[in-house]
Amino acid sequence: MAAPVTVYRTQWCPYCLAAERLLSKRGIAYTEVFLDRDAAKMAELKEKFDWRSVPMIMIGDKFVGGYNDLRALDQSGELQNLVAAQ
């Protein structure tokens, strides 16, 4: 069973869209959580992950970072391993 992937994002973020395209291209299912109208949730996640931008990407219970981090995991082959290992 694959680990759940969650993409915390905003509606018009180009990096959020790029992350979702990458996940879709790899056949990895994900859940989107839009933060546009939930400033409290955005602030909570920024504090929790010590991360200041979107997307904020979780694989299982592990915060992996944003789009550039996701792309680096994909290029190294670790993305599939993380999704499968959870």
Image (cartoon, rainbow, N blue to C red):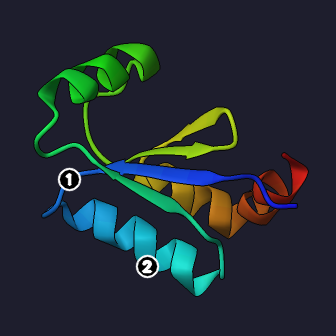
Mark 2 or mark 1: which is in front? 1
Q: Amino acid at mark 1?
A: Thr
Q: What x and y, as percent, mark residue 35?
A: 22, 43
Q: Quadrant location of residue 62?
A: top right
**Label 2 CA crowd tier, 10 Å (few <14, some 14–19, many 20+):** few
Judge left or right: residue 62 versus residue 47. Answer: right
Say which residue appears at 78% left-offset and 52% top-offset. 82
The quadrant in which the N terminus is found is bottom right
Say which residue appears at 54% left-offset and 80% top-offset. 24
In front of the other: 12 or 15? 12
Q: What x and y, as percent, mark residue 60?
A: 69, 42
Q: Amino acid at mark 2?
A: Arg
SS of the residue under disc 2 = helix
Check disc 2 and report the residue beneath it.
Answer: 21
Among numbered discs 2 and 1, the one appearing first in the sequence: 1
Q: CA distance from mark 2 to mark 1?
A: 15 Å
Image height of 28 relative to 60, above or below = below
How many discs appear? 2
SS of the residue under disc 1 = loop
Judge left or right: residue 66 versus residue 36. Answer: right
Check disc 1 and report the residue beneath it.
Answer: 10
Circles 2 and 1: CB distance less than 8 Å?
A: no
